Amino acid sequence: MDSLFEELVAIDSETALRFFLTGIREMSCAERLRDDEACYVASILAHYSLTSRSDAVSMPSLANLSEVFDHFILQTSMLENADLLEFGGSQILLFAGFFRDQMHWRHNVAWYDQVGQSLYGRASQHAKSPKRRDLFDRLSESLPAWTIVCRDLSRGLRDNRLLLRMN
């Protein structure tokens, strides 16, 4: 991120990660979910909160679940690339989770929960690192719970719009 922008906004990746992780940990239903999964989900939310859709350096977020469908359901050429499968799962966490209230008017978000489970399951099969394989395998089972945690976090943040204070 541009240092001038960081100075003006006063938010960096570490601050964003702590913000989302604190919010996730405060959710009552998140207590029964694993902490490494909570860190992973918070890192996804933090990453996309700081990444422009027009970012040419990193992989920007898709626009909505329709684009997830176009890229991960209609196209099957990337079904053995763990990084792309993880990207698809992260997009579902973002849209069917954090933006669930907005997406459910146009999409069957419960079906996308299942798609996300499948993407993380396949990412687990193709991941090189045993640690990532284990994380993706667990996410392939717990993704519906995480999308609800993300939805509840989003609702809580909307209800308390003055949560971000500079001082």
Image (cartoon, rainbow, N blue to C red):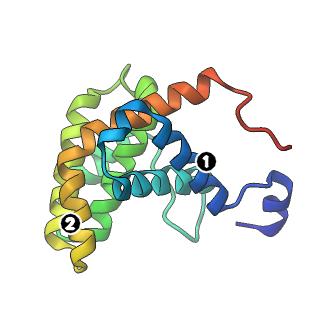
**In this rendering, does residue 75 appear at all?**
no
Q: Which residue, given by chain and number where applicable, does mark 1 sit on?
A: 19
**Residue kind at label 1, given as amino acid type:** Phe
> Which residue is drawn at the image coordinates 43% and 43% (left, top)?
94
**In this rendering, does residue 35 appear at all?**
yes
**Residue kind at label 2, given as amino acid type:** Asp
Label total for image: 2
Query: How many residues crowd mark 1 within 10 Å: few (<14), some (14–19), many (20+)?
Result: some
Residue 136 is situated, as x and y percent measured from the top left of the image, at 24, 61
Q: Quadrant of the N terminus?
A: bottom right
> Which residue is drawn at the image coordinates 17% and 70% (left, top)?
80
Please tell me which residue lies in front, 90 or 55: 90
In screen coordinates, is 86 left or right of 128?
A: right
In screen coordinates, is 112 left or right of 27?
A: left
Q: In which quarter of the image is residue 3?
A: bottom right
Please tell me which residue lies in front, 36 or 55: 36
Name the mark on residue 134.
Answer: 2
Residue 124 is situated, as x and y percent measured from the top left of the image, at 18, 65
**Vertical order, 131 against 101 (above or below):** below
User: Nearer the N terminus, badge 1 or badge 2?
Assistant: 1
Q: Quadrant of the C terminus?
A: top right
